[in-house]
Image (cartoon, rainbow, N blue to C red):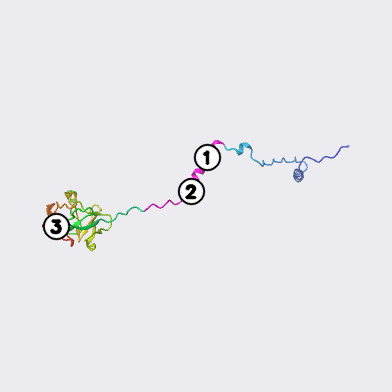
Amino acid sequence: MTRYRPSAVPVAAVLLAAAAGACAPPPTLAPLPALSPSPEQSALSPSAAAAQAAQAAQGAAASAAAQPSPSASPAATGAGTVVSLVSVGRLGPILVDDQGRTLYLYGADSSTRSTCAEECAAAWPALLTLGDPVAGAGVDEGLLGAAQRGDGTAQVLYKGHPLYRCAADRVSGDTAGQESEEYAGVWYAVNALGDPVRGG
C-alpha cells in the first residue's frame, strides 16, 4: 500500500495555483535573500575603501570648518602720534615728536591743509598719525588735531598749523630747520601756545 507523503510544494504555491486556475503551472517562488552577507559583500574593495576614507576625510574637514576659529587678538589699530613739549637750548620749550625731534610749522601754510608736497615733503616730512594725536607732557590737548593730506594720510595739527620734521635734524635736540627759508616760506619751531618761535 502506497503511503501518502505530504507534497514538497509550499502551501502558498498551492493556494496561488488554485487562484490562478488548475491549468496554470505553479508559480516559481524567488529564493529568500541571504540573512548574512557573503564574504565578497562584507569585504570592501580597495577602490570602495578609498572612496569611504575620502568621504570621511571630507566630513571631518567640513566639521572643522564649521567650528568657530579662536578669535585672534585684535590687531593694533595704530595709536595716535604723541606730541610733547621739551626745552631745547636757546629756543626754550618747543614741540617735539615721540623721538624728541623738533617739530616745525611752515610759514607758507595758510590753513590746516598742507602746501608742502613732492620735493618739499621729502625735505620736510609731515608729522603723520594713524589715530587721534596724543598730548604728551606740556602740550595742550585742545590744540591738537589732524587734517588729511593729498595722498590720503593724516597730518598732525597744532593750533591749526600742520606740523613737520626737518630731514636735516638727525637726533633729538637738533634744530637745523629753525628759521630756514625754503620752498617759498620760513620754517619755525613751535611753542606751547602753537605760535612760531623766532630767534634763538
The residue pinned by badge 3 equals 91
Residue 15 vertical position relative to residue 109 in the rendered view, above or below: above
Mark 2–mark 3 contact, CB under 8 Å?
no
State the residue at coordinates (63%, 37%): 39
Q: Earlier in the sequence, mark 1 or mark 2?
A: 1
Would you name the residue on which mark 1 appears? 51
**In x, y percent, where is residue 26?**
75, 41
Residue beneath the point at 55% across and 36% down: 46
Residue at 53 percent across and 41 percent down: it is: 52
Q: Nearer the viewer, residue 114 or 143?
A: 143
Q: Earlier in the sequence, mark 3 or mark 1?
A: 1
Depth check, mark 3 against mark 1: the one in front is 3
Residue 63 is marked as 2
Amino acid type, callout 3: Leu
Please provide the residue range marked out in magenta. 45-73
> Which of label 2 and label 3 is nearer to you?
3
Residue located at (52% from left, 40% from top): 51
